Amino acid sequence: MARVDNINKAFEPEEAEARMYADWQEKGYFHAVPDPDKKPFCIVMPPPNITGQLHMGHALDNTLQDILTRYKRMQGFSALWLPGTDHAAIATEAKIVEAMKKEGISKDDIGREKFLERAWQWRDLYGSRIVEQLKRLGSSCDWQRERFTMDEGLSEAVTEVFIRYYNQGLIYRGERIINWCPQCLTSISDAEVEFEEQDGYFWHLKYLLADGSGELILATTRPETLLGDTAVAVHPDDERYAHLIGKTVILPLVGKEIPIIADTYVEKDFGTGVVKITPAHDPNDFEVGLRHNLPVVTVMTQDAHMNENAGIYAGLDRYEARKKIVADLTAQGLLVKTEPHKHNVGTCYRCKTTVEPRVSFQWFVRMKPLAEPAIAAVRNGETKFVPERFDKTYFNWMENIRDWCISRQLWWGHRIPAYYCQDCGEITVAVPAPESCMKCGSSHLKQDPDTLDTWFSSALWPFSTLGWPEKTDELAYWYPTTVLVTGYDIIFFWVARMIFSGLACMDETPFEHVLIHGIIRDAQGRKMSKSLGNGIDPLVLVDKYGADSLRFALVNGNAPGNDQRFQEEKIEAGRNFTNKIWNAMRFVLMNCEDDLSFEKVDRSRFTIEDKWILSRLNTVITEVTANLDRFEFGIAVAKIYSFLWEEYCDWYIEIAKARLYDKESSTRLEAQFILNDVLARAMQLLHPFMPFLTEEVYSYLVLDYRADSIMISEWPKPDASDEYPVQEQQMVLLMDAIRAIRNVRVNMGVVPSRKANIILVTDDLTVADMFVTGKGFLERLASVSGLEVRDNKDNIPSTAVAAVFGGGEIYIPLEDLIDIDKELDRLDKEMINLKRELERVEGKLSNEEFVGKAPEKVITSEREKQVRYQEMYKNILARIELLK
Ligand SMILES: [Zn+2]
Ligand SMILES: [Zn+2]
């Protein structure tokens, strides 16, 4: 039975992927251990949310990580790709609350404990869904080391950091104005606020001076907050108002007197130069209030309704209140004018509700002392962004950073380890829970009900997953990690916080490189989103085309940091590539005997094409390795693609056929050897990109060396004995000449069976020599019947057709390409037909009745025909002229 009889006609991804993935896992290839004989390489996976479903962003992110990990593993590194999931506090809690709502119950109905039970159940049910989906992509993560942000070890890391920061004065509790989501009912950090431009108004209001001496005009975009105004402010240098500072105005609708204060926060030249100050509902006003000791009057509830301080407006939703207040101001003659105005409004990144600044007691991380070393670490290159331009985004954020509000009014998350004495008010921060108050000894202690921002735990991910705060071998071996791969949208949320946390806890930045990738847009360049319904489910693509084709499509054309458009044609190209390789393998094996052995291969028998393909492979190995080291995945895969498709399949196989088919050929064995060896090494280069196909092809090839699996085989190195620069150059010239001849033939419509003589004109002896040696190629690949070499153009018939290539000129006698008499005959007939058609069209177009009645479309079409026929007619005439 021949070798190929057992091999499928086409690669069947569905069956092959499941079989191989299970096999790799079973053999423990994904598992890495600290190995002093190897160099460490480590990527921590950006932990997907347990609420998540695999989307194209994950598919890209994880494909890139898998490429790097597989590449480094083959290079002999102890390569760890550490996976895990994130509890995603706010997102998960929202899902559970939503599900409970359908049952008609709320969080308060069942209480904290029962709620958390549900949350854990939910996590057990759905938390591994995304992990299973990641496996479908071929991700070679060390699943034995999978972590979860709320598992025991990581929770310990969280409380350890909280207590450390607290004891170092880096965490404090304070009454501050924070971003509040009236829908999620929790505070959210600055990074979680998304800004969108909305249409709004400037309402110009009149505040009367209390002493009756006049009025101040000011503008606001939020008139409902005036109920909480506790001052109006002007700039201290503003001469227009200098005499009013210290006086009071009557707050409209409320009727109470509030002071006119001076503060440099006010912009003199903006509007009238007067602003209202509402410390409870605006972050800037809050700061002004602190400076001037103004009272803080909150006029809204947590769900953005007006509260008891709002008087007759109490109970109204903030937007209803706005309408009513504007109406009442108009009625009282206090509304001067209304002016349309576009402004940026902060919305909650989770639910898109307009965020309400709110004053409350929250926990904060003091950012300045943490940000400074983190800025320095990127400035001095300890961590490098790829592409470099993203360090600007990072610096900009870190240099302007405000304290990080880390407490959340949620139950699903790490609970803040702070205990309040019910007797003396002392706060104790400790783990485990203290039994009595450190100050007064009272045992009436109550734990803070809040939990920590979900990013507080993911900020520790690069070291908590390796075992910190324990001093583990893993931590010593793999920290700092090598590369972090992530999208630019979470540089603030996550990358920046990991960098300062790593420096604070480990004294070292958490990774050498941050590889930033863009987002995947739809074919029209739009962001994929639920609301547009233009998202593509990567798993559907895997089912349809296979994981390798999807991975190929994601990486092909990808450049770090750039967004890309996704078109189904891209993945079809991946599938075609798979087929091309599969067919090449089958062809090679069809021409290899069952008992084939390469023991007797003799390098001195290598032909010019053997040397060329080996030399080319050497170059490709060198270049692809360099590209991968620079994270240029798109360029690397394009080089492998064109090497395999064009050089190996379209040229080398075609040229080698003659030797394969001739069982007596003295170099047949060498051709068989090179076909197998070059394809195997190219499969190794391609393995990180297309792991399944390459494993399968590698396993079938005839090799006298072979690892148990391609994924643990050694990454190819260029081989000095495969360097053949001269032969490489010669082959390039020959190929160029063949292409030129083929072009001429195609343009003239010559059938391949018609052979032609060629005349090579060159004064370069090496080129002439090479053609004589390569005559066999020319015969087979360019339908050449005879070759004549000349050093000048004299006496070459003027009708001969020229084909220009890198090494000179080739002339082909016209009569070799076409039968001139027959061709003239054919052209004559064609001309007669064309003339008849042309007359018909012209007749129609000169017929007034036709032109008057026929629809516009028909007339246009006839006019186009006329132009086309005239053009064709001219071409035929020219052709006849030439032949005569
Ligand atoms: Zn929200
Ligand atoms: Zn106490």
Image (spheres, helix red, strand yellow):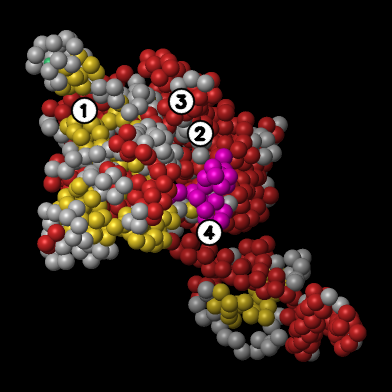
For the residues labelled 1 and 3, say whether their Cβ atoms are less than 8 Å apart. no
Q: Where residue 383 appears, x then y in whole percent? A: 25, 45
Q: Where residue 517 appears, x then y in whole percent? A: 40, 48
Disc 2, SS? loop
Question: What is the magenta segment's predominant secondary structure?
Answer: loop
Q: Nearer the viewer, residue 347 or 414?
A: 347
Q: Earlier in the sequence, mark 2 or mark 3?
A: 2
Disc 1, SS? helix
For the residues labelled 2 and 3, say whether their Cβ atoms are less than 8 Å apart. no
- Find out if the beta carbon at label 2 lies less than 8 Å from the nearest ligand 1 atom: no
Which residue is drawn at the image coordinates 40% and 43% (left, top)?
321
Under mark 2, the amino acid is Gln
Q: CA distance from mark 2 to mark 3?
A: 19 Å
Q: CA distance from mark 1 to mark 3?
A: 29 Å
Q: Where 573 falls versus 26 (above or below)?
A: below
Q: Which residue is mark 3?
A: 97
The quadrant where residue 654 appears: bottom right
Under mark 3, the amino acid is Val
Q: Where 593 falls versus 469 (above or below)?
A: below
Q: Nearer the viewer, residue 525 or 261?
A: 261
Q: Which residue is mark 2?
A: 53
Q: Earlier in the sequence, mark 2 or mark 1?
A: 2
Q: Pick out the residue farthest to the left.
A: 439
Residue 499 visible to an observer of this rendering: no
The quadrant where residue 700 appears: top right
Q: Which residue is mark 4?
A: 608
